Image (cartoon, rainbow, N blue to C red):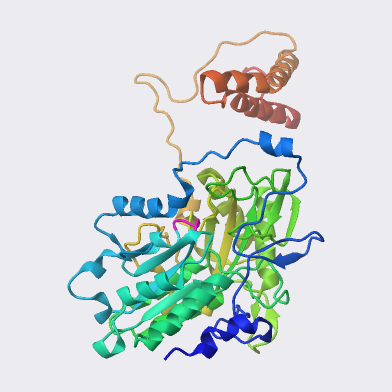
Amino acid sequence: MVDLRRTLLPVLLLSSGVQPFSSSRATSPLGSTRSSPSVSGRVTATSDVPPPAVEGRSKSATAAMPRPKKFLNDPADAVDEYVAGLLLQYPNHLRKLAGHNVVLHGSFGDEEHPNLGRVSILSGGGSGHEPAHAGYIGENMLSGAILGGIFASPAVAAILSAIRAVTLPTARGGKGCLLIVKNYTGDRLNFGMARELAAAEGYGVSMVVVADDCALPRTKGITGARGVAGTVLVHKAAGGKAGEDGAGLADVTAAAEAVSDGVSTMGVALSAVTVPGAEEANDRLDGPDMEVGLGIHGEAGARQCPLASCDGIAGEMLDAIQSYGRIGPDGESVVPLYGKGDELLVLVNNLGGTSNFEMSLLARSVVSRLEDADSCVVSRVLVGSFMTSFDMQGASVSVLPLRDVTEDIVALLDKETTAPAWVGCDVLENGKARPSSSEIPEVAAAAAPGTASGPAQLPPVEVEDFADLARAALAACSAALAEAEPLLTKYDTIVGDGDCGLTMKRGADEVASRLAAGSLRLRPPP
């Protein structure tokens, strides 16, 4: 029989502080709600619908805004068509559960049920965070993923059907199922109710709630931190443990909790998310500012501030992570997440609309800050799109100190997987210098046969005041090229790829800089 006290009371007793599902960072019985700025600028709870566009524009201004461009048919069919596209890409790897937007590993179509030999793992949530979570289905990761509507939690019926599909009842030899859930109200309620219903049917099910976001203070509200990109590392550890011979549900749950309790994440957005089907673009961040701590559904972050440099943005995120900290050994005090000499795993996550080029710049900024300023050792750097927010131009950084987890957990994070969205990690052995930091020497040009080695001998130049003339000519050329950049860019945009003006200006600026520094050789050779 379903325990209604655990299933329904959280809804009625939101303010009681009762916590039916364990998580050291998710303090609410329901999990984090979406949030948006109120009139006063304070954060207020809302539904799972993303915040509306900024109010105050005239009707004529609203009508004049162009409709966002998306690769889209009917928005109502978008999730169904996304699943269909996945199945076409991975015809041997994935299967769909009939009647639901639930994607499973292909082995669940085999005659022998996989749950007889290993614990199953499910995750999911609203669509719009791809490749999470269906992209992490594979050996040593997820068994399946339940897809809700756009930014909407999946229904209890879909979650329960997924549990039944990947799990055998305990009485029939099933090894159980772990649910990995991000800390949001709808997800915690629906996954939690499905868990109770499955337990009443004889299935062994446990649940871990991930709350890795550091955007809002620990003392703000009762909902706890949100679950964001660090969830992917929880998938990896739990999946790796499930792949070990003899691992039971308690073992897999413990591996997931170890990473969930240790990882912290902070994000920054340069533009807001526009969901498919919206009549106009979300222009809340169209100005020159960036937003620190913007949520993966577009919910408000900690604050907006002037756009910083890449190094500055990395510093903002890492400062927030350190300020949020972790619970100390006494179980009460808050201490910094990492300290001098700590070995770290860092995940730099693209929120959807940031170029790969910029992601590499951000990764350099993050690692440089951690190693040069904070004296840590970053042995694992994962960079890519792990948990997105459609087209949001932004990024998040997740930090997992490896001193807080056992060597076995580290091995699980390094374990190979067939999940198509997982990006492999080039592990740096702790205590060793990066081979990539040492440049391969340039090979000098060989002398032509029959000639002496060394630079060619040039005829003497006899021009009075040569250095002054050269300096003036180079300065004039540099200034002219820099001034002509907009025109050159305009013409090259019409006939080429639009980079001519910027490239010429970059070269001109460098020449001008070296002239000012006196580092250009202006005198002719003797």
Left or right, 278 with reference to 215:
left
The structure residue drawn at horizontal position 66% and vertical position 22%, both measured from the top left corner, is 485
Q: Relative to the observer, which residue lies in front, 31 or 97?
A: 97
Q: Residue furthest front?
A: 59
The structure residue drawn at horizontal position 62% and vertical position 87%, both measured from the top left corner, is 18
Location of residue 483 in the rendering, given as x and y in whole percent from the top left corner: 72, 21
The C terminus appears in which quarter of the rendering? top right
The structure residue drawn at horizontal position 55% and vertical position 19%, both measured from the top left corner, is 494
* Occupied quadrant, residue 363: bottom right
Q: In this picture, which residue range is highlighted in magenta?
A: 127-131
Q: Residue furthest right?
A: 40
Numbered marks: total: 0
**Magenta residue check for 10:** no
Characterize the magenta stretch by its predominant secondary structure: loop
Task: Say if residue 412 shows up in the picture.
Answer: no
Q: Relative to the observer, which residue lies in front, 102 or 115?
A: 102
Left or right, 126 with reference to 273:
left
Q: Residue furthest left?
A: 111
Q: With respect to residue 434, does 239 lie above or below?
A: below
Q: Relative to the observer, which residue lies in front, 292 or 188?
A: 188
Left or right, 467 with reference to 453:
right
Location of residue 266 in the rendering, given as x and y in whole percent from the top left corner: 62, 63
Task: Say if residue 496 shows up in the picture.
Answer: yes
Location of residue 16 in the rendering, given as x and y in whole percent from the top left corner: 67, 86
The N terminus appears in which quarter of the rendering? bottom left
Q: With respect to residue 130, does 324 lie above or below?
A: below
Q: With respect to residue 81, does 66 lie above or below?
A: above
Location of residue 197 in the rendering, given as x and y in whole percent from the top left corner: 42, 83
The structure residue drawn at horizontal position 55% and vertical position 71%, both measured from the top left corner, is 186
Q: With respect to residue 292, does 70 lie above or below?
A: above
